[in-house]
Image: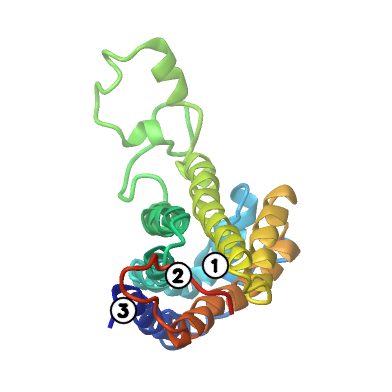
């Protein structure tokens, strides 16, 4: 069997893993706490990922949301493996296309593989937010400094920490009573790097399928790529983000369907360029 055919077979194997994670591992989230999700969101993970401020994660705060936070911690742990499955599926499919002579597919390999560390970085930021929600500020008993009623981050630092600090650094230390505002801003960046990469390789897949005259198969990736763009332009609107997440399902299924079609193609003859035949 040729290397390209092996790549398409591995695509099918990773498809099974991609489907197994949400179906068998993530499960159903528990009920929300006392606060609702941001307008338009129905999925806690999406509402968390696309939070724009502290108010948007109110549904994760407080004792009433303890079960939901615990569920999210478990999901985040499992999600460290999930991107290897879904992005790996895309990468090996693009590899198969490249080995068939569609050398522009190499760009798709890079976009898909870059999604893996981007997803891990997003997970790390989400985990840090969940940890602070579970154990606010310092994580241990600290008394507020004289003149203040509440503990702020400055109170968590060792005595004398700012003795050699610049006035600017010391001023910044009074800015937040929590790392949450900073971490949510970091999450917005991390989230859009990940989703931007997914949207980019969806669009690239559509372009390659169109060039290979498999234009019906290009429809789902086009819609998925456009939905990511529209979600970004909407300012992470909940209604739009939920539609986007659903449009990703047919896009992801395009990889195994296309892989089966390419496996059915007759391999190129030895000594001739391996350019993919049109379906």
- Give the mark toward the camera: 1 or 2: 1
Q: CA distance from mark 3 to mark 2?
A: 36 Å
Q: Which residue is mark 1?
A: 45
Residue 29 in picture, x, y percent from top left: 53, 79
- Give the mark toward the camera: 3 or 1: 3
Q: Secondary structure at mark 1?
A: helix
Q: CA distance from mark 3 to mark 1?
A: 35 Å
Q: Is residue 153 left or right of residue 197?
A: left
Q: How many marks?
A: 3
Res. 42 in view: no
Res. 232 in view: yes
**First reached walking from the N terminus: tag 1 or tag 2:** 1
Density class for disc 2 (Cα within 10 Å; few <14, some 14-19, many ≥20) is: many
Residue closer to the observer: 159 or 172: 172
Residue located 24% across and 21% down the image: 160
Residue 169 in picture, x, y percent from top left: 40, 19
Q: Which residue is mark 2?
A: 72
Density class for disc 3 (Cα within 10 Å; few <14, some 14-19, many ≥20) is: some
**First reached walking from the N terminus: tag 3 or tag 2:** 3
Which quadrant of the rendered structure holds the C terminus?
bottom right
Residue closer to the observer: 227 or 27: 227
Marks 2 and 1: in contact by CB < 8 Å? yes
> Relative to 230, does residue 252 appear above or below in the rendering?
below
Q: Is residue 123 left or right of residue 215?
A: left
- Give the mark toward the camera: 3 or 2: 3
Residue located 37% across and 69% down the image: 92
Q: Which residue is mark 3?
A: 6
Marks 1 and 3: in contact by CB < 8 Å? no
Marks 2 and 3: in contact by CB < 8 Å? no
Residue closer to the observer: 147 or 98: 98
Residue 131 in picture, x, y percent from top left: 38, 57
Q: CA distance from mark 1 to mark 2?
A: 8 Å
């Amino acid at each position: 069997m040729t290397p390209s055919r092996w790549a398409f077979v591995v695509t099918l194997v990773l498809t099974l893993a991609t489907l197994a994670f949400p179906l068998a591992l993530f499960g159903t989230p528990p009920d929300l706490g006392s606060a609702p999700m941001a307008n338009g969101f129905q999925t806690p993970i999406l509402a968390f990922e696309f939070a724009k401020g502290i108010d948007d994660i109110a549904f994760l705060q407080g004792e009433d949301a303890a079960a939901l936070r615990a569920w999210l911690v478990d999901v985040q742990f499992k999600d460290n493996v999930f991107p290897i499955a879904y992005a790996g599926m895309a990468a090996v499919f693009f590899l198969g296309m490249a080995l068939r002579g569609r050398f522009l597919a190499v760009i798709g390999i890079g976009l898909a593989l870059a999604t893996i560390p981007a997803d891990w970085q997003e997970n790390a930021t989400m985990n840090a937010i969940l940890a602070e929600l579970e154990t606010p500020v310092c994580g241990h008993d600290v008394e507020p400094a004289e003149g203040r009623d509440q503990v702020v981050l400055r109170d968590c630092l060792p005595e004398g920490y700012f003795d050699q600090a610049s006035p600017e650094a010391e001023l910044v230390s009074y800015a937040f009573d929590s790392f949450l505002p900073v971490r949510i801003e970091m999450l917005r960046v991390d989230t859009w790097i990940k989703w931007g990469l997914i949207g980019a390789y969806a669009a690239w897949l559509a372009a390659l399928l169109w060039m290979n005259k498999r234009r019906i198969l290009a429809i789902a990736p086009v819609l998925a790529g456009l939905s990511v763009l529209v979600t970004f332009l909407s300012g992470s609107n909940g209604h739009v983000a939920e539609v986007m997440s659903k449009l990703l399902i047919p896009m992801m299924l395009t990889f195994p369907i296309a892989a089966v079609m390419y496996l059915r193609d007759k391999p190129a003859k030895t000594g001739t360029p391996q350019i993919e035949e049109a379906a």
